[in-house]
Image (tube, rainbow, N blue to C red):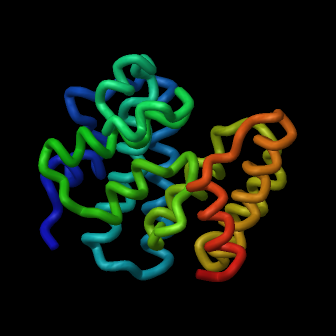
Amino acid sequence: MSIHSLVEAAANGSLPSWSQAGPKRREHMARVSDLLGSWADTLGLPEEDGVRWRAAGYLHDALREETPDTLRRLVPPALATLPPPLLHGPAAAERLRVEGVMDGEFLRAVAWHTAGDPLFGLLGRALYAADFLEPGRTFAQEWRASLRERMPAEIDAVVLEIARARIEHLLDAGRAVLPRTMAFWNALAQGD
């Protein structure tokens, strides 16, 4: 598989012209990319996969600071009813697809890095974890550091623990859990 030039550029921190990410967001994206790159190296993945993983770290939040109304116009109609905090992933994946990125695993990871997806491959699970575990986040620092230390060797167990915490947070706040997120949980819990 050849790597799209937009993905290759993102692996080096160069975002597409359409991205909407200020300095703080870019710092977060760089930390996620660094984590993913180090995990890809630890796993001994081919260089091409390392590029994809680092790029996912940058591109997952490429539209995070775009307005919900704009994001709704960018996603397929079936996704336009997603809650505003979940729109940026599918919108970024759609923009990448329109630009010619045809890497299905990569696009799925970017699209659903916030909610999870039962069809995630290794990249999707790693991005889901890295976005939550990157060291710039200020909540539950000791717990998150202990999870980072277990990565990537225990990726499935760590992702399961993160998914549990995120679902519990939604439930504690009285918010709905997407069917996709519950299917992700079920796939993880069943070891799929």
Residue 91 picture location, percent across and down: 35, 36
Placement of the N terminus among the 4 image quadrants = bottom left
Callout count: 0
Foreground residue, 15 or 83? 83
Q: Residue at x 57, y 49 (%)?
A: 115
Residue 44 appearing in the image: yes
Q: Position of residue 53 (x, y in %)?
A: 38, 61
Q: Position of residue 157 (x, y in %)?
A: 71, 74
Q: Residue at x 50, y 76 (%)?
A: 42
Residue sitting nearer the eye, 97 or 162:
97
* Horizontal arrangement in the rendering, residue 188 relative to residue 174 (left or right): left
Residue 26 seen in this snapshot: no
Q: Residue furthest front?
A: 78
Question: The C terminus appears in which quarter of the rendering?
Answer: bottom right
**Vertical relation: 151 (above or below) 174:** below
The residue nearer to you, when weighing 152 against 127, is: 127
Q: Is residue 169 left or right of residue 36?
A: right
Q: Quadrant of residue 3?
A: bottom left
